[in-house]
Image: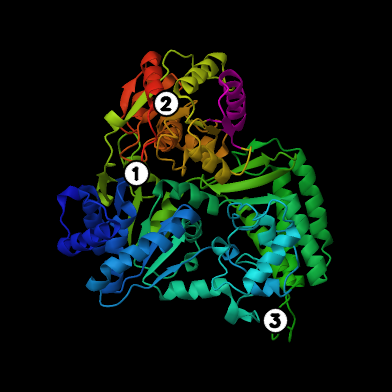
Amino acid sequence: MTGADRVVTDVGQVDAALDAVVAALGGARREGQHAMAREVANALEDGVPLLVEAGTGTGKSFAYLVPAVLGAVTRGERVVVSTATLALQRQILVKDLPLVADALEPLLPRPVEAAVLKGWHNYLCRQKIAGGYPEESGGGLFDLPAPVEHPAGDVDETLGDQVVRLRTWAEETSTGDRDDLVPGVTDRAWRQVSVTKMDCLGARCPMLAECFPERAKVAAHEADLVVTNHAMVGIAASGSPGVLPEHDALIVDEAHELVARSRAAATAELSVGALLRTTSLVRRHGGVVLPELDEAIERLAVGLTGTSPGRLPDGLTPELAEIVTLLGAACREGLTATKPGPGQGSGPPDGGLVMARSALTIALEITDRLLSDSVANRRDVLWCEEYRDGTRRLRIAPLEVAGLLAENLFAERAAVLTSATLRIGGSFATTAGEVGLFGDDTYRALEVPAPFDYASQAIRYVAAHLPPPGRTPGEEMLAELTELVVASRGGVLGLFSSRHAAEVAAERVRAASGLPVLCQGDDSLPALVAAFREGHEVSLFGTLSLWQGVDVPGSTSRLVVIDRIPFPRPDDPVIQALGDVARSRGRNEFMSVSVPHAALLLAQGVGRLVRSTQDRGVVAVLDSRLATARYGSFLRASLPPMWPTTDPTVVRSALARLAVLPSRIEE
């Protein structure tokens, strides 16, 4: 059943509220936005999960915030809104939600209470600043995923300068939230003033009353609407429901990222470096020497050296299983040896000892998981990964997260999942299945088209005359790329499958065209995007970081080039394991796993071009397989309906005209 088949009971109230928001913004009514708002209200009332693909420019955040705020305040039902990025999380809390709250004030019995909730490591720790922890936690491998690197406020700022600035800011901030610090600091500096949840002293912390993350947690438990991120939701999905406050509804924005973020949250790794830091913490703060653990770590180092990088489809080898068993036993012994004795629990605990016991606990949990039957039963995938420094680590990740999401996130609560790209191959079925919604009768779906006339605003060019791409950029592809950049006089966002390909292409185009080409790695990503946005003839080439989230409307981005279809690497252990599962179920592993993965990312990349109703431009895919391969039609069905062509002469002529048009007013 689709959204068009049902009508929400309070449609008048939802429409009036959304009209008030649009009027406050000075915009015009969008029927698609209203249709989405009605269906979101419907889902929040009856609890049937809703999938909404809402294209760029549809105003989807207002379409779900209006019914969410109405329902939360009038029915007393807490709503959690999750985003993939901290940036969108902040935009909702600081920009979008205040507009909605002001517009709805006449319709509500009281003002809406909102709160933001992030991982513990995103907040200052007053106890650590006061000296309650060792200077370096050193537990990066066992920590939650680190936040995105922030550029330092001054290029000449030392680590010490940044820490001094953080200490000063700690006395001024009311939130302790890293995103409120302007200018930002490096991850290394931030680690000096923050801890993870596992390292937190909890109720025994002498500075609990002043704890920033604890305040955020309390505020979230009292709020009508909580804005969080997929990392937190992923932790909840993996079996830690207490991470989020009790809630009646979950709205997932940028929902195409939910599966990957949830899998990442449930991925664990075992490394020699992390274990050595664990033993160091135990010796320094627990006063305990663990010779059995030291011996097991030495054996692990040897065992990993003799293990080839890649997937371990049958689980641990007998040698590794013996080593991991010894590690687990040694960790248990360490936890017993460092347990506070009688009379030691009354005062504040030593922060270093808390960190040591946390590290031992996490290591023990990982060894138990590695020794379980989860890999043999295809619940987990296990592999040995080699890093650039030559070190190797064991990594284990859940194979499928559909069951976790269905059980821990969507059961017994309303759920709305929305994104600009949810349909794959023109259908919601793949996305629905990945999040545990199997069968058309388990959810409703709605497509809200972007307010763009793609056929007249954009050309989709596939270079069908080129040979299929190889592992490195070929001469024919580089020549084609150069001709396109010259015709466009720059203004190119180049999306490449690898850093090497981007660098080779940038060097070639610079030399052949004389036009300025920025390449990912030349500077911080925000600085590169800013420079690209400001220069009419500037081009920017890069990899995965540019495929999603880059928003550059206007004539400075008039050509998006994609070097090849973004299929996952065939040696990716998770992709290999998912392929095995698909094959065991009688499905084609390539069409079931690799093609949908590529379709989603390809749609994200193509979506970088048209960001406003005034944008005009070309998407050029330099991979002939999009036009010639049997799976090409499936991939094309996932893309916006741009005017298609395979004629290079037509495209170069169009780009030449675009190059001389005056800059358009950005919306």
Main SS of the magenta part reads helix
Q: Is residue 539 above or below residue 124?
A: above
**Residue 56 bears which disc, if any?**
1
Screen quadrant of the C terminus: top left
Residue in the image at 40% along x and 59% along y: 92
Magenta span covers which residues? 496-520
Q: What is the crowding at mark 3: few (fewer than 14 residues within 10 Å), some, or many (at least 20)?
A: some
The circle drawn on residue 659 is 2
| Residue kind at label 2, given as amino acid type | Ala
Colouring chosen for the image of the structure = rainbow
State how far apart marks 3 and 1 are (Cα).
51 Å
Q: Residue 583's spot in the image, x, y percent? A: 45, 32
Residue depth check, mark 2 versus mark 1: number of the one nearer the observer: 2
Amino acid type indicated by mark 1:
Thr
Pointer 2 with pointer 3, Cβ within 8 A: no
Mark 2 or mark 3, earlier in chain: 3
Q: Answer few, some or many: residues within 10 Å of disc 1's Cα (few below 14, many 20 plus, some between 14 and 19).
A: many
Residue type marked 3: Pro
Q: Is residue 563 left or right of residue 1?
A: right
| In-image side of 443 versus 411 (left or right) | left
Q: CA distance from mark 2 to mark 3?
A: 66 Å
